[in-house]
Amino acid sequence: MNILNGNPRNKWIGLALIAIALIALPFVLAQAGTAWVRITNYAILFVLLSLGLNIVVGFAGLLDLGYIAFYAVGAYVYALLASPHFGLHLPWWMILPIGAFVACVFGILLGTPTLKLRGDYLAIVTLGFGEIIRILMNNLSEPFNLTNGPKGISGIDSIKLGGLDFGYTTRIGEIAITGSIKYYFFLLAVLLVVIVINFRLQNSRIGRAWEAIREDEMAARAMGINTTRMKLLAFAMGASFGGIAGGIFSAIQGFISPESFVLNESIMVLAMVVLGGMGNIWGVVLGAVLLSFVPELLRYTVEPAQQALFGRQIIEAEVLRMLLFGLAMVLMMLYRPAGLLPSAVRKRELTRDES
């Protein structure tokens, strides 16, 4: 990021180069197959989730193991309001704010009874909340069919922007713009807005209040900070980003079921935040990108490599992915506990603890 910290001319040149690279990226990836564009889209979704969780875990210091519940809430709100399930087909620009609001309400519902909990106790309660939401989605099919149970909801509307339907390929001359490429640019726009909001929050009075609560809640309260309101605000803001990501996920997939929102997804998002560096926005983005792409690279390379070396498959790609993932996290905790790009405050905390 040094190129962005120099004189204004270098800053604008750096931003222009980054913009060109981001615009060209989906077209380059499409040459290797549409799957890689879809993988990139899911990586951006995980970045959105990680930035939302970073507000709760990184800024406010509240350990949340049930964050995927807000993702599920946003996804189901979109599915119920834009599918044949209830015969409703509202436009996406109306549903996404509704999904964010409903997820925000669920965030407050989770935060209210856990205001006095910290650390392991808070983690256990939030984990239970995430599982409760998944179980509810799995069982709310009788006597009134709200979620269609384990069968899920299908036929979900894609996003339509003007005359562009993101569910279909559009041709401009010789250039084919697939639905995945359209979703890529849509997700990129949403991501830029979320990153700006995150920076504004971090550098605001609210962000400093969250930091004070994370460092010492009793001292923050003594300084006049309304810790109850600030903690609820952290849960609500983090949940709203999860709700937006869930709505977009629902539109991309066209089908959702409770199995998309299991505990492993919450653990993965938390690992992205920890790997990148809690409290550092660019670190969280890096962690999410790495943990989204590296497993997929292994999926495509492990089996051919084993066939070339041993003539047969010895270890399944999924097993090796999890082994390497676990090993990487252990090494990170041993040698870089603050993450790949830790925030300055977090780095000072760990240095102080070690001394």
Image: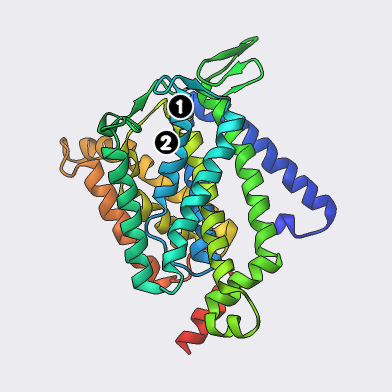
Q: Quadrant of residue 258?
A: top left
Q: Are marks 2 and 1 in contact (CB under 8 Å)?
A: no
Q: In the image, what residue type sits under mark 1? A: Ala
**Residue 85 position (above or below residue 149):** above
Write the residue at 54% across / 84% down.
218
**Which quadrant of the rendered structure holds the N terminus?**
bottom right
For discs 2 and 1, the disc positioned in front in the rendered view: 2
Nearer to the camera, 54 or 297: 54
Q: Quadrant of residue 8?
A: bottom right
Secondary structure beneath dot 2 equals: helix
Residue 342 showing in the rendered view? no
The colour mode here is: rainbow
Position of residue 83 in the picture relative to residue 121 (left or right): right
Write the residue at 49% across / 30% down.
37
Q: Which mark is residue 32?
A: 1
Q: Which mark is residue 219?
A: none
